[in-house]
Amino acid sequence: MLFIDLLQSIADGLLFGATYSLIGIGFTLVFGVMHKINMAYAAASVAGAYAGLTLLKLAGLPPLLVIIMACLAGAVFGLLTYVLCFWLIPLSHPLATLMSTVGMLLLIDEIVVHLTAGMPVNYPTVMGGMVSLGSFLLRGDLMFIFTIAVLAMAALMYLIYRTRLGLATRAVSQQPVAAQLCGMRLGQVNALTFTISGALGGIAGSLIGSAVGLLSPLLIAPLTVKGLIVTVIGGLGSIPGAIIAGLLVGAAENVFQFVRGVTERDIYVMLLLFVFLVFRPGGILGADPGRN
Amino acid sequence: MLQVSDVETAYGKIKALKGVSLSAAKGRITCLLGPNGAGKTTLMYTIAGILRPLRGSIRLDGQEIAGLTSAAIVSRGLALVPENRLVFPQMSVKENLEAGAYRRKDAAGIAEDIARMYARFPRLQERREQLAGTLSGGEQQMLAVARALMSRPRILLMDEPSLGLAPMIVEEVFSIIKSLNRDGVTIFLVEQNAHMALGVAHHFYLMEQGRVTFSGEPGKLAEDEVIQRAYLGTRRASA
């Protein structure tokens, strides 16, 4: 019985971990092309989920479409983050954009708290039922968010590896000077990367909202931390790394919760990060070896 | 074809180019020699639009290109093969070539040019699906040249194409330079290897400490003087 429960928590964790993968990808994409951390990313993702819900209600659309609305809103917030925190800020100073994005994180958090009076908002849950496989139960909503997350990742992979814009994104992240010599515009590629990562964030935010059943500004801080942990464990700049690390952190977190309870859970997640930093500081799929 | 007049470029407050003037004639190989730190790479990056000049003019076929973005300059027919090659290491050879044609929209023409590059550099065809980072130095140099050619440049700038290559490969690189030039590509070449460079150049300049200090046609007399100055970076070596 205990063993089944353990497996159950691993399965649930893996399914939910797909949202962490998306958040990790968002951090890692921006780091890949700009070699900067966007601290406001998880906040903008949650804001995208809020804005998606608001748009949905305004337009009177069916609940399923909340993901698409959040994706669009997230893309706008991503671009906005780029303009305000990167385009307007001198990039040569290493700490300037770190400060500007932390400022953006706090600003978004504050705006969300004010607009919702600090109260959680109910979020539409899709496919609330259960699927049973023997003594094994799979939550329908978790399977749904996993499927959507995988589709989003597949779309991203197609964009990055099969299109002209993706070629430019990879070129800029691997060799920015040569990318410019080929006629690629850094500003354009950066803006595009922020927009794409924002769209993924919006999707992740709405998936998390629908899995939890509500949205709250209290999601922002832990999601920021989890996203950064996933990015580091996966290897800064590696998209496949972020995917694997997201699933790993999701599963590990659920196991820790199962074994030690929800109050101690995050201690062990931090410990996992610590273990990686000590024994494999480059992350699962190492840092990009391509820069000289 | 390319005319650089009185160009100054600075990194912060340090001027790397202190009023450089030179020109590269159409259909010829022009070579720029000079010791380390003379500002040769800075000049190349300034012409290609990676760095912005503080003042001065850079003209391509009479049109001012100083201050344009590198994207605009590539579109006007000037391509740079950068120092250290700078291939995209995690992309295949084929993708590197496609990246070189980024500003072009003619899919058929691009495919044709890729085939032409494979014909000119058979090694690249053999390794077309291989990641560029796994190629040898010489192969990476060929790839960097082919990538630059993919933009169909009228003038090709090359920054130290022999850097870090074995002598046999250096010979090969220079024979490629000659054959490109025979096919009508104007070439402006920066080299440390003065001996090899003077072997192919129609005209050369010597640059020292951010200024052009010598200009002439290659010949025995000039060569001794220039090699000494290019390597030792001094007017009269005491040795």
Image (tube, rainbow, N blue to C red):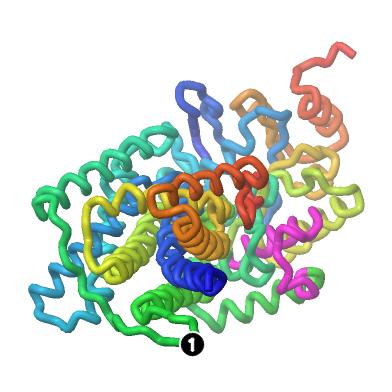
Q: For numbered disc 1, what is the local secondary structure?
A: strand
Which residue lies under the disc numbered 1? A133
Query: Which residue occupies the foreground of this view, B186 or A30?
Result: A30
Q: Which residues are magenta?
A: B124-152
Q: Is residue B129 magenta?
A: yes
The residue lying at 10 percent from left, 74 percent from top is A57
- In the shown orientation, is residue B16 left or right of residue A90? right
Residue A136 falls within the magenta-colored stretch: no
Q: Work out whether A166 lies above or below A231.
A: below
- What percent of the width, then of the height, locates residue B60? 50, 52
Furthest toward the front, the residue is A1
Percent from the top left, x then y, of residue B63?
A: 43, 52
**Residue B153 appears in which quarter of the rendering?**
bottom right
Q: Residue at x 34, y 78 (%)?
A: A141
Q: Residue at x 66, y 72 (%)?
A: B94
Q: Is residue A283 left or right of residue A114?
A: right
Where residue A172 sits in the image (x, y, percent)? Answer: 51, 55
Which residue is at 84% across, 44% downward?
A: B196
Give the amino acid at mark 1. Answer: Leu
**Secondary structure character of the magenta stretch overall:** helix
**Residue B101 visible within the image:** yes
Q: Which quadrant holds residue A214?
A: bottom left
Residue B70 in view of the camera: no
Name the spot of residue B27 as percent of width and height, x first: 66, 58
| Above or below A240: residue B110 | below
